[in-house]
Amino acid sequence: MKISFGPPAIPRSGALVVGVLQDRVLQPMAERVDKATGGSLKRAMSAGRFKGERGQSIVVLTPHGIGASRVVLLGLGKPDSFDALAAQNAGGKVVADLAHSGEKAVAIAIDPPKGAKIGGAALAAEIAYGARLRSYRFDKYRTKEKPDQKPSLDAVTVMCAGAAEAGRAYAPRARVADGVYFTRDLVSEPANVIYPETFAREARKLARLGVKIDVLDRRQMARLGMGALLGVAQGSAHEARLVVLRWNGAPRARDKRPIAFLGKGVTFDSGGLSIKPAGGMEDMKWDMAGAGVVVGLMMALAGRKAKVNAVGVCGLVENLPSATAQRPGDVVRTMSGQTIEVINTDAEGRLVLADAMWYCQERYNPKVLIDLATLTGAIIIALGHEQAGLFANDDELAARMIAAGLATGEPVWRMPLGEAYDRDINSDIADMKNVGSGRGAGSITAAQLLGRFIKPGVKWAHLDIAGVTWSKKDTPTVPKGGTAFGVRLLDRLVAEHYEG
Ligand code: BES
Ligand code: MN
Ligand code: ZN
């Protein structure tokens, strides 16, 4: 999608979008168009139920008196609650409405609503950002799509008085959208295409942005003693990899310790010998989304030249059953020295993360470590597909993440950690076992295991994104499929608290 900015004007062709506030209050540009078309817009409104509510829209086709082939009246709702997210949703809604309409170009002429929380160039930039986010499509494997089934829309112009300023405000957001796209691509690819080695190859593309990349192979990880991560990988013909991405955007910072992001990258999770049922197993191609988000986030940070020192670590394995697979009951030794009894080979994400987390801390001494993982089905039972589960050993970090989540439309809900839960993963023959003893609190016992691999003094947060990584329905800025949940939240967290 080509996205640009220009001064407000009624275009001579293509689609035009104008804004309508709650109770059919036309914005100035909408008034102008209504006059130019002999009152067509008001007539169209009174012919139906359109009230100008946020998320509503109606279309007037080929109105007399102007060159534009259609006018979309976009409901903006009440101005006092119109904020950056509402602006993004407006941009996304326009793309959703027109993508398959036959229109090639759309001009969006939404005036800053009086009393809104956003206006001017920032408003235009957020509308453009929403349009870009919603334009994502993963269609590389559709070979039989007819031209008239493909999206027609390929250009969005957001009109605003300070077009140049809007372009400057949009630039960093566009780099975040690049990261979101990259993550969505990785998550959408099937597991015969993306496995540890090919994931690492994709991650290397970030070199052109100035990101430093190291890839550890099986032998290097074996030498480091990563028995838990390698135990998961040993059933697959695809070898494990550990990808480390470094962006040093603040070389002269007083505290040079980085903020670290760590992702579960199980490129396919069959469950291993504790095999999953066949129904829905194909979803487990996206069990690498935590790692995918880490790569997309690093792309966003480097792309917009964030003034931060950040490290991204991806633990990459494929979890398959075979003659070489690990068995229930096996005991593995982690890089930290702690041992884990593998009761259930399907609780593999925590095994991968345990070694990746330890390596990350030993090697990079981060002040903050945030991991993302499609870790448990239990978090879907608790929170559904609306919010991710947040676990943290630090209240300030948790509060910052909750705020960043609300601001970006990627909400997270804090879950508890505690000693009683921790006791539940004690093992009779090893330091711990990889599942709790009962059936309850599965997301918490998983988080407790991760917590045992955090060194004292390290601020740590864990996001269980199992319920929010893949969406079965469209939302205004996220088409169904891979969501890249976490990229926007963590980019915002960095921008607000860890830059400069
Ligand atoms: N990758 C799954 C969790 C998952 C389930 C993600 C559904 C997305 C959708 C994870 O590796 C897993 O299998 N967890 C088990 C843990 C159990 C064996 C203790 C689960 O949640 O059932
Ligand atoms: Mn599993
Ligand atoms: Zn898994």
Image (cartoon, grey):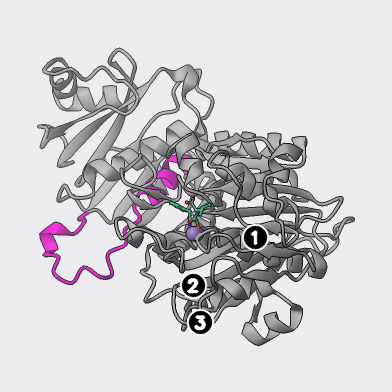
Q: Nearer the viewer, residue 83 or 279?
A: 279
Residue that badge 2 annotates: 318
Name, please, the residue furthest toward the bottom.
219
Asked if one can make out residue 160 in the rendered structure from this viewpoint, the answer is no
Asked which secondary structure carries label 1, the reply is strand
Q: Earlier in the sequence, mark 3 or mark 1?
A: 1
Residue at position x 76%, y 42% from top?
Answer: 393
* Amino acid at pointer 2: Glu
What x and y, as percent, mark residue 255? 88, 56
Q: Secondary structure at mark 2?
A: strand
Residue lying farthest to the right in this orientation: 254
**178 lies above or below 15:** below
Seen in the picture, residue 429 relative to 195 is either above or below; the reply is above
Of marks 3 and 1, the one in the foreground: 3
Task: Tell which of 468 and 48 is nearer to you.
Answer: 468
482 or 298: nearer the eye?
Answer: 482
**How far is the residue under mark 3 from the one under mark 2?**
13 Å
Q: Residue at x 35, y 25 (%)?
A: 54
Residue 413, percent from left and from top: 58, 34
Query: Is 413 on the left or on the right of 65, as rendered?
Result: right
Is 436 a magenta residue? no
Q: What residue sits right under mark 1 in the picture? A: 262
Q: Residue 207 vs residue 426: left or right?
A: left
Q: Quadrant of the N terminus?
A: bottom left
Span shown in magenta = 124-152
3D distance between C-alphas at marks 3 and 1 = 27 Å
Disc number placed over residue 324 in the picture, else none = 3
| Residue 100: % across, % down | 18, 50
Q: Residue at x 50, y 74 (%)?
A: 199
**Amino acid type, mark 1:** Leu
